[in-house]
Image (tube, grey):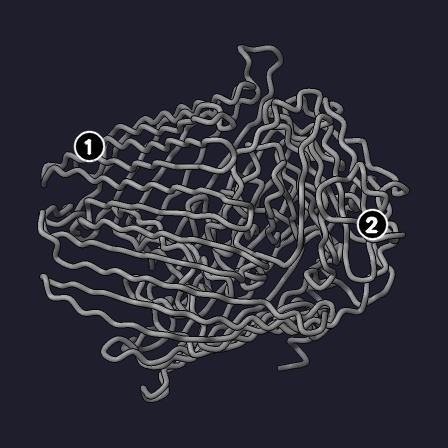
Amino acid sequence: MCKKFSQSISLIILLFSSIIYSSPNSDRLTKAYQAGSTPIIDGDVLNDPAWTSIPAITIFTQKSPDEGQISTEKTEVKVMYSDKIFYVSVVCYDSSPEGIVITDTRRDAVLDNTDSFMFILDTFKDQQNGYVFGTNAVGIEYDAQVSKGGEMMSIGSSRQSVGTGAAFNINWDAVWDVEAQVGEYGWSAEFAIPFKTLRYASKKNQEWGINFQRTIARKKEVVYWSPIPRQFSLNRLLLAGTIQDINVPNTRNLKIMPYGLGQQNEVTVQEKSSTNKANDFGIDAKLGLTSSLTLDMTYNTDFAQVEVDEQQINLDRYSLFFPEKRTFFLENAGLFSVGENTYYGPDIEIFFSRKIGIGAGGAQVPILGGGRLTGTLAGMKVGMLSMRTKAVEDVTNSNNYSVFRLKKELPNRTSFGFITTDRTVLGYDGYTNRAYAIDGALGIGEATQLIGFAAKTDPPLGIEGDAGSYAYMLEANRNTQAFTTQIRYSEVGQDFNPEIGYVKRLGYKKVLFRILNRTRPKDLFGLLEIRPHITYYSYWKLDGFQETGYLHIDSHWEFRNGFRIDTGINFRTEGVSEAFEIVEGTIVPKGTFNNKEIHIRTNTNLTKPLSVTMTNTIGGFFSGNRRNTNTTLRFRFGDRFTSDLISRYNDVDLPEGQFVTHLIRSRLTYAISPEMYIQSLLQYNNQSDQWSMNWRFIWQQSAATGLYVVYNQTEDYDGIPIASSTKSFVVKYSYLFDVLN
């Protein structure tokens, strides 16, 4: 058996090696220089003698608005390193420095609509995994991890991770430093990234993949050192340039991050209140076993400082998806990703970390502790995770969760791997649920990729046999300058049951097809780009009953002045095999409903202090009609105060009943500095008749450590009277000790 398996693996590797096209990085080549002296990280590049002798990178090419043209403003980038630090400096010259746009001063604020500079490092030069670092003219820290070659960023997915499979993890926070200055010349910034923050091969002299991006917001100009065509972003590692002669240290890394927490909770139910106070402590540790392998450990883990989930309104039959926000689970999250992701979130995740420590309805389940090993070993990507949660009376037993992941990455976005997950309920007759999956990707040339996975699980309790406990997906996509095409087939058995995964629906076959065109007209009404596209997908039950059908015909009209309008029509089919309650008191009957709807989406210039995004959809909805209006109003005052007011409104008229749903969300932020800010999230949902507030004072001293003061309040109503109220006040302080520094 083992011999046959080994022979099969060897044959697969040989086959892949014979048909993949190993495309080199671009011809852009530069060199890293040994620092003669230590730069002062204050943003003043021009007056720092440490940078004087370092040659500058000055050639930058536009992706937008005039693709292929030289940048309209001069940019100088320099790279050097010391025994411990990798340094990057940039001088963004600007002929109109008064026009520099600063939209946000929070860590990881989106850099698309502000004057900004970013770069990506492919430290293994595998064209698959990278680190993104960036800043704007006030020196915010922006960092992220890229996996899967940034492939899924090419088809229009959100910059934020919708699932761990989004190939872009903005929630990863590393230990590094950046400062920026604004002057009559424009603005400049200096980056200092410890080698300990990065993972790389063990050899001494190395070359990495690298690329640089600058955004000039008022011109909607985006430029790159290694040119990127319109269909891709900085995350396209296949198109990165090369930096040579980096003499990396053989780092030893041990960071310990203890925390202390004080908390007061007040719960009121039908005018009867109870208050409890608690103090707690815990500790996280990060041990660099090698320069490419890291062990993370945690004891008595607490995530009280994390922003609460954004409320959602569910007008369908299927479960909602809430993304992972907890720091411990986010580093190298892309390694553990196996499943099927869509623009709106995943249909399937074999491993979904929110199943650990978060119970039904979002209730916290205490995490006793655990560990995670990630990195590269013997040429393979390795991921292992083990966590144990405490028992909660009348809620859940103690559980042990385990994940094991192996992945082999080959040139040109090609890989294959294996994952297994295990949930064991302690003290419950040793109940265990396991899931297994294999996955792979095959890059063909620079534009085409085949991807897929196949999975098997233990069946749910009470189900005899495992014939229905499977899932698989096959996809082909091609992404050129003019067209993006995608075709996918997936199937999920009725008993598919990954208990530490996520499955939106069961027992279906699905077909998806998408084609999108990008056209950039010359001198036509100020248009920058037109993107007509067609998307079709359909879910059929395994007996052939069509459960969902969706045909979307749309065109995006993007203008050089920042205005955008989308115009489209949707053809929908909803097959309801069993009547369900869509809202309290309104039952959607069994049947098949075919509807049409039109939608218009607009946004004003997002670089302005005041901007509006609005989507209106009108048409049929199950057995009746719906009018949907989603509005986002953004306002900023200076570079310190930002606000978003979001409204999600549905007016539904069915023969079975008429109802209105309204979700209002307001996020307000005042940044005292890039490391210190106050943020509030206010939400009201009339579907659940619930109002909530999350207020946070954050003083980040290093990565995710520092002082957090958090106030949460939730009011549940029963008509007008308050049925229940929950208030909590938390003070948490954590500190990072770099033991081997």
Instruction: Determine whether, in the image, residue 414 is placed left or right of residue 226.
Output: left
Q: Could you tell me if residue 145 is visible in this image?
A: yes
What residue do we see at 86% from left, 59% from top?
Answer: 247
Estimate the x, y position of residue 417 in percent, counting from the top left.
Answer: 61, 65
Q: Is residue 651 above or below residue 519?
A: below
Estimate the x, y position of residue 115 in percent, counting from the top left.
Answer: 61, 32
Estimate the x, y position of residue 225 in percent, counting from the top left.
Answer: 76, 36
Instruction: Determine whether, in the image, residue 164 is placed left or right of residue 597.
Output: right
Task: Report the label total.
Answer: 2
Instruction: Determine whether, in the image, residue 687 is placed left or right of residue 14.
Output: left
Q: Could you tell me if residue 384 is visible in this image?
A: no
Q: Is residue 562 above or below residue 153?
A: above
What residue do we see at 25% from left, 35% from top?
Answer: 649
| Foreground pick, 739 / 528 | 739
Task: Find disc 1 in the rendering and name its residue.
Answer: 625
Viewport quadrant of the N terminus: bottom right
C-beta proximity under 8 Å, tags 1 and 2: no
Viewport quadrant of the C terminus: bottom right
Disc number for residue 646: none
Give how far apart the Cα atoms at labels 1 and 2 are. 62 Å
Disc number for residue 80: 2
Q: Is residue 626 above or below residue 682?
A: above
Estimate the x, y position of residue 310 in percent, counting from the top left.
Answer: 35, 49
The secondary structure type at the circle numbered 2 is strand
| Foreground pick, 399 / 43 | 43
The secondary structure type at the circle numbered 1 is strand
Of mark 1 and mark 2, the one earlier in the sequence is: 2
Quadrant hosting residue 252:
bottom right
What residue do we see at 48% from left, 73% from top?
Answer: 421
| Foreground pick, 387 / 698 | 698
Instruction: Determine whether, in the image, residue 366 is placed left or right of residue 175.
Output: left
